[in-house]
């Protein structure tokens, strides 16, 4: 039987033109999507960019951008901290001081101007002299000097601040305080204890003293009414970041620090079901120490000066001891104003906890290493039994631990001891090459260093004999390798470079990055990342940008608009697909009429 020709009203008659119409609409939508996507990023044209991997492996024409001369921010932005900006605090709640946590401005409110230095700013005093003094005009704040003069935190003399090493709980000086602490914790003397965190650090006198004893401390304090505690620390060459234990985890992996310290830091440890102590428990490695001085320690002799009663302080001390015991801490030592507790060295204590124990064990729904905008939980993080050498007594002592492949390298793709050793060797070769291009590296001209996207901390390890320290940054969106950094006896934080970093302006002498734009260009706008680098870099400071040739010219163009002097160099193996851009930030001053 012959098939009839379709009539105009037949469905088969409409099939061909309908199909053509759908194809046309799909093509038009794809065109509009590409057009509007490219409009979202004005400074970096992304018409048809290949993946990050293909850029490094193919000979694409380098990305080109238009030159921009960035204006100067007004002088009242000289200490601008975008994600901890006091001007924005009223937008957020007071619950557990959460307004002091990170609250970054939306893209529509991000500044596109250069943060100016204070009037009269000078190049910082060099280490080690800087540990005890800094220029007043570089950190022109008198609040601590006026309020804490009787405690000898610092004093102003002429055009300088001096730091005599005093503190609320160490009237005889920080050195005498740490001497007593070392007697209570012998591991502080023999390399067992290497990394520490100081919560509520004041002007970081404790962390500064530990540097002389071979211990590396992250000093942590919020941006609060003490005015620039963290800025004072970094100005002096002491590691520090802005932060507070409030409603979110601190930006560190579990089982990281060998010791945590609180010297009258005013953190209400026993409130909110002990949630702040549970966070300290999470970030301490097994066998790690928690040191507390101040209320309620030594309440028998101190209570009269605390505006309280002996009964109230005894009750608080008993409550604290009970809470710590429930978390498998043991009182390790105690004398005068210092008490030391030790986290359980193994899982034997945790195994005895029942379903009705308080605080309860954390379930497996949240990664114990997840720490970027991760809410605090009132539960106990149990150390993984997959790793037998996380504990303080099983980790090699410093400095041996620096060059031993930690167990946690197995968490990293292509990791393990082989990948670790290859990375270590590679960075020694790279840093040797850097020294030929930047003679200031390894001298007293460079003290505060940041490796903006590390894996194992290889760059920091290769510089370990230099008079500097390195803040190792691991991407919150990348491979979780920060635990390895801490296992080596180094320090670092998680961070997302699409957002500003938790520090004050002018706090680093050198910023180093390795393929950061290649890795993050699909998420972060190049312009804002470079402006953030300019904010935290000191005048006269340097950047070493190791990057694909696809991005390098664009970075150089934007850097020129930020008043940087840059020079392109070959890598140690003279590769065409990857180059080095070494830049130096100029010292300039803002005009008082700037209103940007």
Image (cartoon, grey):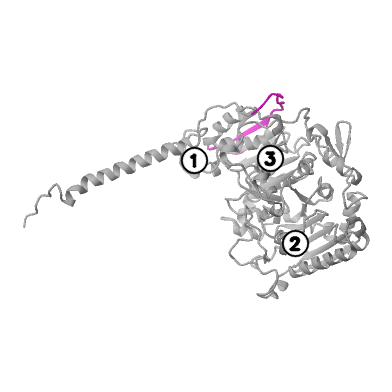
Residue at the image position 69 percent from the left and 28 percent from the top: 586
Q: Give the x, y percent position of residue 501.
A: 66, 43
Residue 540 showing in the rendered view: no
Q: Secondary structure at mark 1?
A: helix
The residue that disc 2 covers is 271
| The N terminus - image quarter | bottom left
Q: Give the x, y percent position of residue 273.
A: 72, 64
The answer to which of 119 and 290 lies nearer the viewer is 119
The answer to which of 401 and 223 lies nearer the viewer is 223
The residue that disc 3 covers is 87
| The C terminus - image quarter | top right
How many neighbours does mark 3 have within 10 angstroms: few (below 14), some (14-19), or many (20 or more)?
Answer: few
How many neighbours does mark 2 have within 10 angstroms: few (below 14), some (14-19), or many (20 or more)?
Answer: few
Closer to the eye: label 1 or 2:
2
Q: Is 584 within the magenta?
A: yes
The answer to which of 542 and 120 lies nearer the viewer is 120
Q: Is 514 within the magenta?
A: no
């Amino acid at each position: 039987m012959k098939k009839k020709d379709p009539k105009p009203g037949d469905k088969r008659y409409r099939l061909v033109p309908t199909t053509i119409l759908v194809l046309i609409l799909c093509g038009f939508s794809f065109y509009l999507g590409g057009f509007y996507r490219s409009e979202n990023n004005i400074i970096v044209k992304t018409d048809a960019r290949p993946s990050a991997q293909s850029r490094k492996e193919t000979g694409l024409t380098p990305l080109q951008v238009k030159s921009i001369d960035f204006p100067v921010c007004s002088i009242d932005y000289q200490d601008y901290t975008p994600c901890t900006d006091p001007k924005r605090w009223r937008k957020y709640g007071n619950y557990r001081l959460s307004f002091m946590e990170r609250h970054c401005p939306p893209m529509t409110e991000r500044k596109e101007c250069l943060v100016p230095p204070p009037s009269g700013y000078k190049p910082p005093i060099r280490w080690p002299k800087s540990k005890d003094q800094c220029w007043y005009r570089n950190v022109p704040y008198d609040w601590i000097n006026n309020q804490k003069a009787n405690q000898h935190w610092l004093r102003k003399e002429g055009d300088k601040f001096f730091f005599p090493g005093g503190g609320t709980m160490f009237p005889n000086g920080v050195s005498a305080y740490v001497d007593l602490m070392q007697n209570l914790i012998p591991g502080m003397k023999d390399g067992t204890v290497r990394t520490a965190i100081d919560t509520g650090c004041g002007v970081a006198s404790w962390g500064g003293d530990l540097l002389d004893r071979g211990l590396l401390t992250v000093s942590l304090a919020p941006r609060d009414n003490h005015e620039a505690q963290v800025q004072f620390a970094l100005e002096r060459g002491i590691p520090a970041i802005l932060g507070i234990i409030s409603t979110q985890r601190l930006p560190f992996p579990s089982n990281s620090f060998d010791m945590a310290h609180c010297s009258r830091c005013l953190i209400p440890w026993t409130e909110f079901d002990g949630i702040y102590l549970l966070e300290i428990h999470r970030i301490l490695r097994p066998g790690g120490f928690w040191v507390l001085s101040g209320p309620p320690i030594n309440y028998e002799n101190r209570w009269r000066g605390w505006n309280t009663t002996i009964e109230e302080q005894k009750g608080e001390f008993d409550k604290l001891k009970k809470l710590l015991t429930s978390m498998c801490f043991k009182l390790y030592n105690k004398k005068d104003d210092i008490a030391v507790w030790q986290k359980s060295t193994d899982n034997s204590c945790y195994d005895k906890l029942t379903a009705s124990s308080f605080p309860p064990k954390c379930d497996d729904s949240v990664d114990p290493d997840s720490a970027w905008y991760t809410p605090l939980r009132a539960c106990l993080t149990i150390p993984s039994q997959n790793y037998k050498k996380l504990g303080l007594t099983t980790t090699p002592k410093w400095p041996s631990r620096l060059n031993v492949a930690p167990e946690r390298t197995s968490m990293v793709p292509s990791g393990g001891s082989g990948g670790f050793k290859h990375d270590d060797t590679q960075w020694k070769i790279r840093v040797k090459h850097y020294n030929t291009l930047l003679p200031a590296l390894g001298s007293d001209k460079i003290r505060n260093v940041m490796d903006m996207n590390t894996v194992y901390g290889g760059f920091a390890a290769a510089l370990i004999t230099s008079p500097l320290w390195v803040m190792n940054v691991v991407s919150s969106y990348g491979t979780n390798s920060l635990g390895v950094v801490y296992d080596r006896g180094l320090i670092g934080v998680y961070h997302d470079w699409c957002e500003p970093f938790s520090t004050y302006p002018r706090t680093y002498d050198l910023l180093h990055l390795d393929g950061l734009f290649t890795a993050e260009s699909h998420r972060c706008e190049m312009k804002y990342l470079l402006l953030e680098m300019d904010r935290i870099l000191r005048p006269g400071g340097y950047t070493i940008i190791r990057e694909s040739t696809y991005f390098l010219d664009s970075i150089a163009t934007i850097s020129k608009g930020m008043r940087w002097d840059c020079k392109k160099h070959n890598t140690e193996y003279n590769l065409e697909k990857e180059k080095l851009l070494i830049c130096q930030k100029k010292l300039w001053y803002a005009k008082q009429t700037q209103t940007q």
